[in-house]
Amino acid sequence: MTQSNKSPQKSPEKKGKQTMKKSQIRIWFLIPLIIFAAFIVMLYFRLGQPTDIVTNTALERPVPAFELPLLSDTSRIMTNDNLPDQPFLMNIWGSWCPTCIIEHPFLMQLEERGVNLVGVNYKDDIGDALGYLNRGGDPFSMSIQDLSGQFALDLGLTGAPETFVVDGEGVIRQHIVGEINESNWQSRIRPCLMVLNEADKSNVSPDPDQVKEACK
């Protein structure tokens, strides 16, 4: 008897199951690629977006109470009583923060223009922080060390760098998310500071309507 060399034919049902399994395997391989592509698209559309001014829990309230060491001399404990009694900017920064490095030269320019800046060194190694200021210059009238990050969170921090505009009475009037640059300084921050400084010179509380308009 002659044996056939032909292999047994697979039934249409088996072929269908195998095709389905292959399709499922392809889908599982594609899912991570789809997620990655969506992430890249999201980042792309975030690039170049303007710095936002956001409302947070500390806005229109006094700077939260704190007792934190002075960065340049950690044996000295700073409190709200050590803050300037005139309008100032409170800048949250860290030596580990790439955007802080980008922002730093402009902070030096503001210091040269007579703007009072208070630094909050956020979750940083003290040696790295002091080295950062030694290399790039120190624009701050003082920097406090917020090693745990709790004070920054009490302010409403979402991520360094961020800056808070504080009036002469210690009330937070504006919250800047992201870096300060010439653009948002001229369009947002400077008008707010001007209103606060005028009120401070006149020894009166800032007009709520003016603050609302200038510090939006």
Image (tube, rainbow, N blue to C red):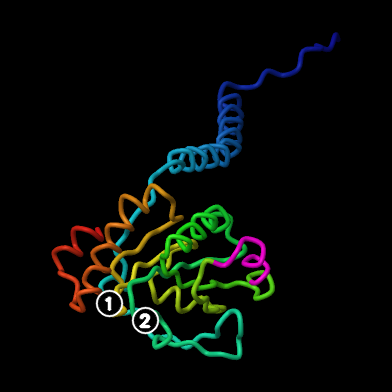
Q: Are marks 2 and 1 in contact (CB under 8 Å)?
A: yes
Residue 132 inside the magenta-drawn segment = yes
Q: Which mark is residue 203?
A: none
The residue indicated by pointer 1 is 61
Q: Which residue is drawn at the image coordinates 42% and 69% (left, top)?
A: 116
Q: Relative to residue 189, is residue 129 drawn left or right?
A: right
The residue indicated by pointer 2 is 64
Q: Name the secondary structure under disc 2.
A: loop
The answer to which of 81 and 121 lies nearer the viewer is: 81
User: For mark 1, does the 10 Å Cα neighbourhood hold few (<14), some (14 to 19), or many (20 or more) residues?
Assistant: few
* 24 relative to 10, above or below: below
Quadrant into which the C terminus falls: bottom left
Which amino acid type is marked by label 2? Pro
User: Residues in magenta?
Assistant: 130-138
Q: Relative to residue 92, is residue 60 drawn left or right?
A: left
Which amino acid type is marked by label 1? Arg
What secondary structure characterizes most of the magenta part? Answer: helix
Q: Name the secondary structure under disc 1.
A: loop
